[in-house]
């Protein structure tokens, strides 16, 4: 599922830039693709919740009071993780499904650890975590992502949640 975040960062960046220079039906098509890519973040949210639940179970098995440790001090990472979990569900609202501001906010949250390290001038001493998937299995990751893309696009289409299906864009 790390590939989903990586694909989101790449595709959302390109789609936002392309939406600035296109017009007409191409722009509407890009809005539909952007909406699909945004909603697909929910898949990675569920995987993140699964990982966090696994960490919680391991900590409880080892006798650690998870809630005491977690709520002892709230850091930027805690806030970031909560926002990464909650914000993708806002993309289910039809008016926000292709919202550029929300997409940019998600880009910032997913890349914030890299951005903070670059700002702190530690760019030479950190691992580039954006590309954290295996290039050996790139074709499998791409096929998996594309399959989910088709499924999510179809669901949005049949649920009439795509930006092109709004009353303002009907011809």
Image (cartoon, helix red, strand yellow):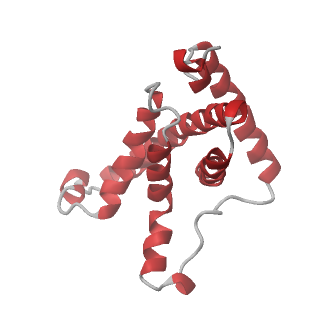
Q: Could you tell me if residue 56 is visible in this image?
A: no
Name the residue nearer the viewer: 24 or 1: 24
Residue 104 visible in this rendered orientation of the protein: yes
Question: Looking at this view, is 53 or 42 the one in front?
Answer: 42
Q: Position of residue 101 (x, y in %)?
A: 45, 46
Q: Measured along the vertical axis of the image, is residue 132 above or below residue 128?
A: above
Residue 149 appears at what percent x and percent y? 68, 33
The residue depicted at 65 percent of the width and 63 percent of the height is: 131
Question: In which quarter of the view is residue 135 placed?
Answer: bottom right
Query: Is 37 on the left or on the right of 108, as rendered?
Result: right
- Residue 82 location in percent, x, y? 34, 48
**Residue 30 left/right relative to 118:** right
Q: How many marks?
A: 0
User: Which image quarter holds the C terminus?
Assistant: top right
Q: Residue at x 69, y 43 (%)?
A: 22
> What residue appears at the point 78 percent right and 40 percent down from the top-left corner?
143
Q: Position of residue 39 (x, y in %)?
A: 54, 34
> Which picture quadrant has residue 102?
top left
Q: Is residue 149 above or below residue 160?
A: below
């Amino acid at each position: 599922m790390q590939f989903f975040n990586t694909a989101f960062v790449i595709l959302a960046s390109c789609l936002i830039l392309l939406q600035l220079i296109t017009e007409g039906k191409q722009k509407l098509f890009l809005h539909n693709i952007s909406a699909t890519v945004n909603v697909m973040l929910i898949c990675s949210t569920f995987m993140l919740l699964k990982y966090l639940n696994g960490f919680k179970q391991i900590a409880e098995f080892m006798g650690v009071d998870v809630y005491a440790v977690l709520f002892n001090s709230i850091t930027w990472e805690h806030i970031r993780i909560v926002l990464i979990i909650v914000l993708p569900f806002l993309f289910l609202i039809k008016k926000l499904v292709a919202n550029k501001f929300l997409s940019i906010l998600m880009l910032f949250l997913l890349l914030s650890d890299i951005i903070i390290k670059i700002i702190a001038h530690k760019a030479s001493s950190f691992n580039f975590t954006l590309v954290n998937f295996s290039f050996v299995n790139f074709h499998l990751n791409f096929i998996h992502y594309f399959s989910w893309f088709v499924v999510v696009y179809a669901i949005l289409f049949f649920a009439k949640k795509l930006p092109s299906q709004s009353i303002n864009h009907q011809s």
